Amino acid sequence: MPELNDHDQYVGDVVPGWETRLAPEPVMLEGRYLRVVPLTSAHYSDLFAAVCGPDDDPLWTYRPIAKPTSLANLWMHLAAVVDAPDDLTFAMVPTEGEGAGRAAGIASFMRVEPRTGQVEVAGVLLARTLQRTRAGTEAIHLLMRHAFEDLGYRRFEWKCDSLNEPSRRAARRLGFVYEGRFRNHMVTQGRNRDTDWFSVTDGEWPEVSAAHQAWLDPGNFDDDGQQLISLSSLIK
């Protein structure tokens, strides 16, 4: 219930003991099926093989640039991402399967606001071999857990092109709540982009985390690695 102040104005709840949080730093996050590590040039060649193949054009439809056609072009793109002063970009390195030990995706912490405790996961790019896998899901879980549990943030954001239906589905499956649409938000590859906003708050995180962990548990997969219970059914 909102509280009335001395001026008969409604004000938000008190956040007990709130202090500015630390900004994220390059760290390695270890999971069962995947490691999340700071992106460096040592990963660029693996990433070119993983996301720039002849059938990978759809992976780049909603990104700021079209699919790079050479390692040199990808190198320049990723070097600029790594050098962005306000962002922190990670490589996703599976520890199981044929691609074990080789980077197969990236994601960045952006819009980092330590003063208010919010951060966005952005620029998520997963190789087709990492999509719809427990390793791919675990990558986002590890980043969320780090933000909420290690850094003490209050809000974790996900944004995507409103026409990017796979990203919208992924957000909901992972437990993010839809917040609305920013119209005419960007121009991407010469086209208009309306942006859909999703978030998870620190109050929602314990339940979302429990659902993630239940789904990621090895007992939830058969001998062929197929899920027994879907994550969507575990998310309330």
Image (cartoon, rainbow, N blue to C red):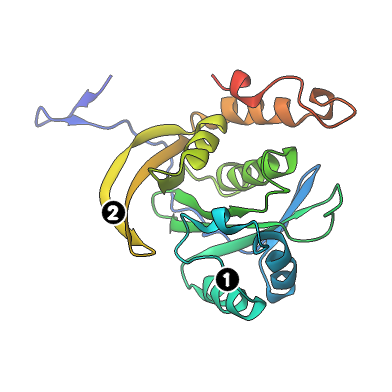
Q: Where residue 57 sits in the image (x, y, percent)?
A: 57, 58
Kind of element beneath mark 1: loop
Q: CA distance from mark 2 to mark 1?
A: 24 Å
Residue 72 in the image, given as x and y percentages of width and height? 63, 81
The mark lying in front, picked from 2 and 1, is 1
Quadrant housing the C terminus: top right
Image coords of residue 93 (percent x, y): 75, 56
Residue, far left: 7
- Mark 1 burial class by Cα count in 10 Å: few <14, some 14-19, many 20+: some
Q: In the image, what residue type sits under mark 1?
A: Pro
**Residue position marked by numbered label 2 in the rendering:** 185
Task: Name the residue: 47% across, 66% down.
Answer: 65
**Which one is in front, 213 or 183?**
183
For the point 45% across and 44% down, the residue is 164
Q: Nearer the viewer, residue 199 or 93?
A: 93
SS at mark 2 in the image: strand
Q: Is residue 171 left or right of residue 195?
A: right
Q: On the rendered image, what quadrant is the N terminus found in? A: top left
The label on residue 68 is 1
Q: Disc number at residue 25?
A: none
195 w.r.t. 175: above or below: below
In this view, 108 is above or below 6: below
Q: Dividing the picture into quarters, in which one does residue 135 lie?
A: top right
In the visual, does 29 lie left or right of 24?
right
Give the residue at x 83% y 32%: 225
* Residue in the picture at 72% in, 25% down: 214
- Left/right of residue 164 with respect to residue 48 in the rendered view: left
Query: Label 2: how many residues lie within 10 Å, few (<14), some (14-19) or many (20+)?
Result: few
